[in-house]
Amino acid sequence: MKPTARTQLRRLPERGSHDLETIHAVLDAAFLAHVGFSVNGQPFVIPTLYGRDGDTLYLHGSAASRMLRELETGVAACVNVTVVDGLVLARSAFHHSMNYRSVVAFGTARKINEPERKTQALRLISEHLIAGRWDDVRKPNEKELKATTVLEFSIEEASAKIRTGPPGDEDEDYALSVWAGILPLQLEAKAPVPDPLMTNGASVPEYVLRYRKA
Amino acid sequence: MKPTARTQLRRLPERGSHDLETIHAVLDAAFLAHVGFSVNGQPFVIPTLYGRDGDTLYLHGSAASRMLRELETGVAACVNVTVVDGLVLARSAFHHSMNYRSVVAFGTARKINEPERKTQALRLISEHLIAGRWDDVRKPNEKELKATTVLEFSIEEASAKIRTGPPGDEDEDYALSVWAGILPLQLEAKAPVPDPLMTNGASVPEYVLRYRKA
């Protein structure tokens, strides 16, 4: 994607990218987006799940959600997706940093009205969150679809920013007797906790046991 | 804190809170904030580290950062901090959810100019990220302080939203032969990776080995 002023990478452009494949890879490595929009000049930032198909992100929620009601009017919006990969522990306070993968995407959203397209978008969101789950569960019925707003957010412009690798310190600081390096961080799935109300004896599905994101 | 229209909890108010202790606990459980602001009507959402002291959040970065340059003018801003605790796997697609702790805070930022207050704020950010680190490393010198912008963001209003516990399904769905429950998720520290350029033989500090956030 060709950058304009809003996606131009001012700080540390060597960490940045407008490459579509890089942007899609970051969007696919996470499931939580932070959506920004303004109401009467007051910015809001709301976390939400999403799905992706090409340069379209799918968002959903209650028909009563303030975020969705604002976004569906087509106002300018911004979506940020960030994966934290580790703490960068340098020898000086100044050179401390984070290893991360982050995408800032700009665009506008539109409401999806057709029940079939809504259901398809909900499937994308569900599969993006936990692949394999959709086929196992009861699909949304007419009443549930009506209570759910689904938006398609078209990415008009986006940029990725990625930091990897060890700290970079000032030459003279390498002599300090400080431990320096990376503390890797990872969002990990722990042992699944069955619903206490589950009496059907169903075993934990493979896609739950092997869950991995990022 | 007393809610106004922008922090009024419209959706699922039983999950929400304006209690200061709850809000502070969520802010202290994470280290990554998503900051929202608008430039000429275009919202931006940028991830950033932070520190906290009472109802003040400290933000920092390069003096060239677009985000900090905009925020220091005192524009309306929004900070979101979200901790993901797990996936809520219900029997119906509709009742899938996330366990999470999230705070939306509104306010404005101001630049800190005095070097001593700047350094103190940087210490708060550092200790918020990884307690114990600050004492070990070389502190910012005059040149580094000049290259760093530090802002104090005063929280004028905030709300917390928290979901815990098992899925809630429709009565008739409990008979389905679907596995239901929680898949807990946690940001975990893995084995520290020493900087390949470290030749001082320093051992990994305890605060790195025992790192735990959230």
Image (cartoon, coloured by chain):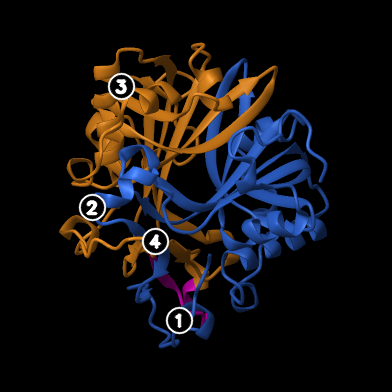
Chain colours: A blue, B orange
Mark 2: which amino acid? Val
Labelled pair 3, 1 in contact (Cβ < 8 Å): no
Query: Which residue: 48% across, 15% down?
Result: B72
Q: Which mark is residue A209?
A: 1
Separation (CA) of disc 2 from disc 3: 23 Å
Separation (CA) of disc 4 from disc 2: 21 Å
Task: Measuring from the top left, give residue A4's x and y in whole percent.
Answer: 79, 32
**Nearest to N terminus: mark 4 or mark 1:** 4
Q: Chain of mark 1?
A: A
Badge 2 density bin: few <14, some 14–19, many ≥20, Cα 10 Å? many
Asked if both marks, 4 and 2, belong to the same chain, the answer given is: yes
**Nearest to N terminus: mark 2 or mark 1:** 2
Per the image, label 1 sits on a secondary structure element best described as helix
Mark count: 4
Instruction: Look at the image and say whether residue B112 sits in the magenta stretch.
Output: no
**Which region is colored magenta?**
B174-186
Q: Which residue is mark 3?
A: B118
Q: Chain of mark 3?
A: B
Badge 1 density bin: few <14, some 14–19, many ≥20, Cα 10 Å? few
Q: Which mark is residue B51?
A: none
Circle 2 or circle 3, nearest the eye: 2
Q: Which residue is mark 2?
A: A178
Q: Which mark is residue A185?
A: 4
Separation (CA) of disc 2 from disc 1: 40 Å
Query: Which residue: 59% across, 74% down?
Result: A133
Task: Measuring from the top left, give residue B92's x and y in whole percent.
Answer: 56, 67
Asked if both marks, 2 and 3, belong to the same chain, the answer given is: no
Badge 4 density bin: few <14, some 14–19, many ≥20, Cα 10 Å? many
Instruction: Look at the image and say whether residue B175 sits in the magenta stretch.
Output: yes
Mark 4: which amino acid? Leu
Please indicate whether residue A137 sits to the left or right of residue B121 in the image: right
